Amino acid sequence: MGLWVMLEGDLETHGFVHQGWAGNPSDDPAWRDVYLDRTARMWHRDKNHASVVVLSLGNESGTGANLAAAAEWLRRHDDRPVHYEGDHDAAYTDVHSRMYPTPRETRSIAAGEPAPSTDAAGAARIARMPFVLCEYAHAMGTGPGGLAEYEEIFRAHPRSCGGFVWEWKDHGIASAAPDGTLFTAYGGDFGEPVHDGTFVLDGLCTADGTPKPGLPEYASVVDPLRLDVTPGTAVVGNGHDHTVLTGLRLRWAVRTSAGEAVHTGGAVLDDLPPRTEHRVPLPGAPGPGQHLLVTVAAHGPAGARRTRDVHLDGPPEDLRGPAGPPSSPPPGIGGPVLAVLRAPTDNDAGFYEPTHELWREPPAAGAPGAADRYRWTGTDPRDATDRPGVVVPTSRRWADLGLHLLQPRTTGPGPGTPQGTVRTVWAAPGADARQARFVLTHRWSRTRAPGTRRLDLAWELPALPVPLARIGCVLTVPVDTAGEVCFDGDGPHPSYPDACAAARPGRHRLPATALAPPGAHPQASGNRSRAHRIEIPLADGTRLRLRSLHVELDGTAAPRGLQWTLSPYSDAELAAAAHPHELPDTAGRDWHLHLDAGHHGLGSRSCGVDVAPAARLRARTAGLSLLLDRVGPDGTVLP
């Protein structure tokens, strides 16, 4: 497989943004010869590499006459297009480039609509140019989210060349704590007074090259073997520019939530030339409690065999039935306890939307985006600050509401409520519990199956000016740390509402310790979706089995079903630690099992765009019903 390379000059003067670009070398005649010399040396070094298809002047250096002169030098020596993101007027470049624009702005520019960043002449030049996002997602911590929305835009508009994720690899340094514990150090860990903190941990791989969850997500989103499924039709596409896909075979199966096949079928497809597609008829929409799984296999570059699969869920099946007499939890299981927060991810704590360095002021009256500046730029008006590009982090807004300090008070369940119902009201200290309260109602009950308990939960939530991180509960579980967790649902990779391309439906098995690694900078991770069954190894040699019966948000079926996370650490412990070795010793203590009816997306706001509206969690009510039992080594359900 080959790569198309944008060759970029080693130039950045971004620090001058803090003084309004005054004194920037890019427009200072004293620096002209230095700019031209650096550009010439870059070109002479790599001019004969056939993989280089675009020449870039540099990065984040404002604009000015020296950059224009460097662009002219390149044109005198080469016919490859010249790129530079800071040329917002398209005055001296051949490719229009943007950094971290919102999907709305990206879609508008890709469609050829006038860009309000410049005058009419500049907008006309931009509309004729190829369009690329030199950065559009920031792979810091748990994330990035929102990649699929950009990819849809790239595919829909021929002049859109795609975009670049920042970046490939974390810039951490292998270090040792005083007790010898190895860890990855980052900015500030060496006593230096000026540093970038965790901002250097922004890669799709860790510092030692281990893929982070963002890498398989990115690979799935941009996969040129494309498969889109709607009721009755599968569209198989070839996104390659030069490679013919051969040996295509399509298989489909309608299965129940238990994995039993209801219908199966397949087809052998003709070879698929680049940038073309096949449309294949399929059965209609799957029925209640069923899902349609479609898989396509093909030979791609160098004859390598590749596969892609997509699933389509039918209407959820409500398996609850009438509840039985009250019961206690399974032995050793604690909770449930309300959970509406997560240990802030780097994106939750992010405070930088670079698009605001360009959009300091609303577009002029009548210009595109003028009537809706905040949707164009991505910022909620309540998040804006007086510093260009700087916004109020979501995690700060959670803290300002006291969501990390919610305190419980158990109240009477009310008349007509089944025996054994527990109603707990949670509120922040000083808040009016009648107005800003979170109510979790739960009931444990027996079922007809000996040893099997049922847990019903319901949430009532206040109207808030910010999305919640999750709507769920926490159970404490005595996990066998050497065991493996088996689950039916989306996996094995984590999935979130805006980062779910890599996860596949099926039966998965992972070591318990691999489900939610805290990362070099501890934060929430490891959420998984659409779980039908989860089996967790317990310290006494038995297994805890959970089966989802029903999940809803605001009175309708939850779109991502039961979402869950299993971690040895609480969210408070993750949030308090700057490095993994600062987390508490968990030997011999219970783990934290999150069971969520809804979960907030990830976004890319560590440097970029916040969570898209469709992936924000704003539900006011939720419900969840589960079956739980303990299973012995021989498969027997225990009392």
Image (cartoon, rainbow, N blue to C red):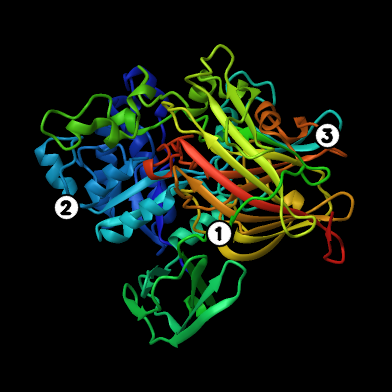
Query: Residue 136 location in percent, x, y?
Result: 40, 44
Horizontal arrangement in the rendering, residue 367 relative to residue 40 (left or right):
left
* Circle 3/circle 2 CB separation < 8 Å: no
Q: Quadrant of residue 634?
A: bottom right
Q: Name the residue type under label 2.
A: Arg
Q: Name the residue type under label 1.
A: Ala
Q: Is residue 552 visible?
A: yes
* Circle 1/circle 2 CB separation < 8 Å: no
Q: Mark 2 points at which residue?
A: 128
For the C terminus, give its image quadrant: bottom right
Mark 1–mark 2 distance (CA, rounded to whole Å): 38 Å
Q: Name the residue under label 3.
A: 585
Q: Name the residue under label 1.
A: 503
Between 363 and 535, which is closer to the camera in this rendering?
535
Query: Residue 196 location in percent, x, y?
Result: 56, 28
Q: Name, please, the residue furthest toward the top.
A: 430
Q: Name the residue type under label 3.
A: Asp
Horizontal arrangement in the rendering, residue 342 relative to residue 484 (left or right):
left
